[in-house]
Amino acid sequence: FGGFVSYEPLSDSDREWLGRAAGWLSAFAIGWAILALLVFAVDQAVVLEAATTRIRSWTAAAGGVSGIVTALLGSSSLTPAKPAGADQTKLSAKISNIILAVAGPVFVAVLIVALSIGLDRLLLGDSLVNLLLAPTALSISDWLGLVGGLIASGVVAIVASFYVNINRFSLHALYRNRLIRGYLGASRQDRMPDLFTGLDSHDNPRMWKLWPPKSGGKADVNCLFHVINITLNLVSTKRLAWQERKAESFTVTPKHCGSANLGFRPSKDYGDSLTVTVKDQQGVALGTAMAISGAAASPNMGYASSPSLSILLTFFNVRLGWWLGNPGEAGNKHKAYRREGPRFSALPLLFEALGQTTDDSPYVYLSDGGHFENLGLYEMVRRRCRFIVVIDAGCDAKFAFDDLGNAVRKIFIDLGIRITFEGLDKLHNRPDPDIIKAAGKKGVPYHALGTIHYVAADGKAGAQPGCRDGCVLYIKPAYHGTNEAAGIRSYAMTSKTFPHETTLDQFFTESQFESYRSLGLDMTRQILANHHVLRHLHDFLHPAPG
């Protein structure tokens, strides 16, 4: 057919359609063949009497080992999240990525075989293959067992999908409650916590309440405006230019929630305003937004997403992310943007497991803001802030500046604004004596200054009144071993990765916490003693007229 119509005006589109259709058909056929092989052939091999013990042992071992390997390698530094960079060229990284790519599917295959064997024994009392190969046909009771099992599993899935909240049936609430108690609760004086849990519901206000009330018909513009950065996952994005990032920026503020690409909804209406009748309790809560912003462990993680990890984390319900309504037009369906989460849980859970999250469905999957841009610089530049303080507290002991480079690239690609820095080459963690000597009395700096070229992007200052370039004060924690206090030096000697210890350590000791606090105070004093920093700070606080 392709040959006969090759001279037709629309033959290119015909052949493209046929090619895509053939590709999908082939993929489905191969997938179905593999699934049938696991369910029938491998199932039968495992239950053969002659090799039962050995094959069962191998199968169980393969499943357990592959699951453990996937979990360990997925969170290991041996498998860098970013597809580019020097770390990915190392032999250890290449080998680890190959093992991770194989271990995940092996775990899923073993899981399918185990479920197949278990269901056969539960419904039929024997292997389905044995019954099909038997001289006599399947009995009525066998057919009833198969059909009954299918109906029962379907009913359970449907009922559970309607009554089990996909957001609440996860580790998110456990994580959120501890963040609320550890941070929001610690900032409130008049608390009445539960005597057993230590939680107080008043510790978690709604986001819209953070905006100050109007005074004389005008809001107090001198108050801080809280912007929480979150990642909207697009692991199954159709935008070819976004195949590396697999995500877009999403923000929650006291006024609006959403993204520049999709649109925004008022915070008072967004996320949990449809079923809640008490007006003061409507809208997304601060604790929920904060926990989503820190949801580092989730099946879909933006540019760090992995097919093997997605399946494993979903299966074990290691899900700190959150499903909320689409802030765009798609969220109007069933008023999804006003709901706490999806009304039907099965499909979203499947999308998480298979990495099929998009931004064109009624609900979107949100996770850690660092899965898109870890510094929060992107949204501040998009708002044209003139003076931005960035504290890069990522685990970057070698000072590769991954998070900063990622932010600068995306800001220029998406917003057309360049940011240039001076002094990045002077930043060092645990510097050599030669570097300390070359720094002289000023010492090795903890910061660098950057220029945000707003004028070049938005037009000349004369054409755009008030348009001027911005400034970034970039702060990078480091241990220099020169002027730090005794407590800091003592702890730094016992922890060679300080102050870039892994975030997997969620339980800080007293000495650990105090060492970070003291180092931050010493760094701030040194930075504020720099006359360049003071000049930019003065220009920001006391702008020139006009």
Image (spheres, rainbow, N blue to C red):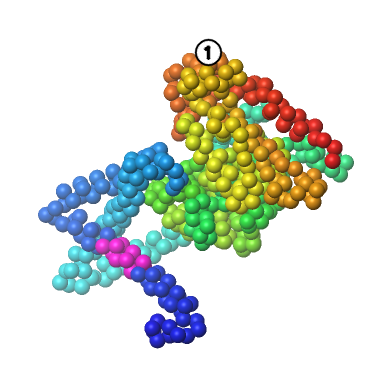
Position of 488 with respect to 207 (left or right) is: left
Instruction: State whether residue 241 is above or below residue 412.
Output: below
Percent across and percent down for residue 194 are 59, 31
Instruction: State whether residue 450 is above or below residue 159.
Output: above
Which quadrant is the C terminus positioned in? top right
Residue 471: quarter of image:
top right
* Residue located farthest toward the front when viewing the structure as drawn: 438
Percent across and percent down for residue 308 are 38, 50
Residue 221: quarter of image:
top right
Residue pictured at 68% horizontal, 26% vertical? 189
The main secondary structure of the magenta stretch is helix
Can residue 521 be seen at all in this image of the molecule? no
Give the labeled residue for mark 1: 486
Q: Mark 1 belongs to which amino acid? A: Ala
From the viewer's side, name the closer residue of 499 and 408. Answer: 408
Which region of the structure is painted magenta?
Answer: 27-37
Secondary structure beneath dot 1 equals helix
Residue pictured at 52% horizontal, 55% vertical? 242
From the viewer's side, name the closer residue of 285 and 249. Answer: 249
Which quadrant is the N terminus positioned in? bottom left
Q: Is residue 289 magenta?
A: no
Instruction: State whether residue 96 is above or below residue 155.
Output: above
Residue pictured at 34% horizontal, 45% vertical? 94
Percent across and percent down for residue 470 are 70, 40
Q: Is residue 32 magenta?
A: yes
Q: Residues within 10 Å of mark 1 (few under 14, many from 20)?
A: few
Percent across and percent down for residue 41 are 22, 62
Residue pictured at 51% horizontal, 40% vertical? 402
